[in-house]
Amino acid sequence: MDAPRRTLLLTGASRGIGHATVKRFAAAGWRVLTVSRQPFSDKCPWPGGEENHVQADLADLESLDTVIANIRDRLDDGRLDALVNNAAISPKGPGGARLGVLATDSLLWRQVFRVNFFSIALLGRGLFEELRRAGGSIVNVTSIAGTRVHPFAGAAYACSKAALAALTREMAHDFGRHGVRVNAIAPGEIETSMLSPGTDEIVRAEIPMQRLGSPAEVAETIFFLCTAATYVNGAEVHINGGQHV
């Protein structure tokens, strides 16, 4: 008999890394469910995309139980094979300026951490049983900004990604004994619409490979962690052309 079709839940799918990840998993025959603050976008089409999209604001933690119930209702046999937490916000100042600690108020700190950190912990907790039934995998998208001061990433964003790396380890410890692997990827300068002016100088000065990464390269690593990497748990994979060295 044919094996059951596997299911991916991905947050933040409309562009860049999320878009490429949707395409990679859909090409492999997976069913892809997405969660986004925006309605389904025809700029990122895939088979069954519109009916498999959940519109939700991950910053609204009070409504997250309802979102999780909606997702559960859409899962076949109560199984979820992979959860990729890609959605994140990175607020900027006027003209795209970096927001340091002195420029970040309490409201902005809370907003960033709700999306980039707390929602991820709560989604993993809320969908744990579905992941356990499938022997599933979680991939959290952190950032090179979580381990070093970045010229464009603000303080709240960087701190949320550092916290997410720690959360990945905690989840790997708690979930791993139940057959659910939890890992993270930490992208560097990837060729997406989020790039800031001045990135070319970072490429020349800091990246040994002397080029930007592509969203498809990131998506391939996510796919590997969700499929073939069956004994990888609690890892944070750097995808930055050697920028971290």
Image (cartoon, rainbow, N blue to C red):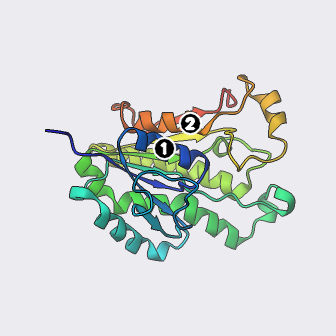
Which residue lies under the disc numbered 2?
216
Q: Relative to 204, say whether 17 is above or below.
A: below
**What residue type is disc 2 on?**
Ala
**Distance from the alpha carbon under mark 1 to that under mark 2:** 9 Å
- Could you tell me which secondary element the residue under label 1 belongs to? helix
Who's the residue at 59% across and 57% down the image?
Answer: 88
Q: Please state which of residues 101 and 236 is positioned toward the viewer in this rendering.
A: 236
Q: Relative to 228, say whether 105 is above or below.
A: below
Residue 16 x %, y % = 61, 47
Label pair 1/2, CB-CB below 8 angstroms = yes
**Mark 1 or 2 closer to N-term?**
1
Who's the residue at 47% across and 36% down the image?
Answer: 235
> For mark 2, does the 10 Å Cα neighbourhood hold few (<14), some (14 to 19), or many (20 or more) residues?
some
Q: Relative to 243, say whether 9 is above or below.
A: below
Q: Please state which of residues 24 and 202 is positioned toward the viewer in this rendering.
A: 24
Which residue lies under the disc numbered 1?
23
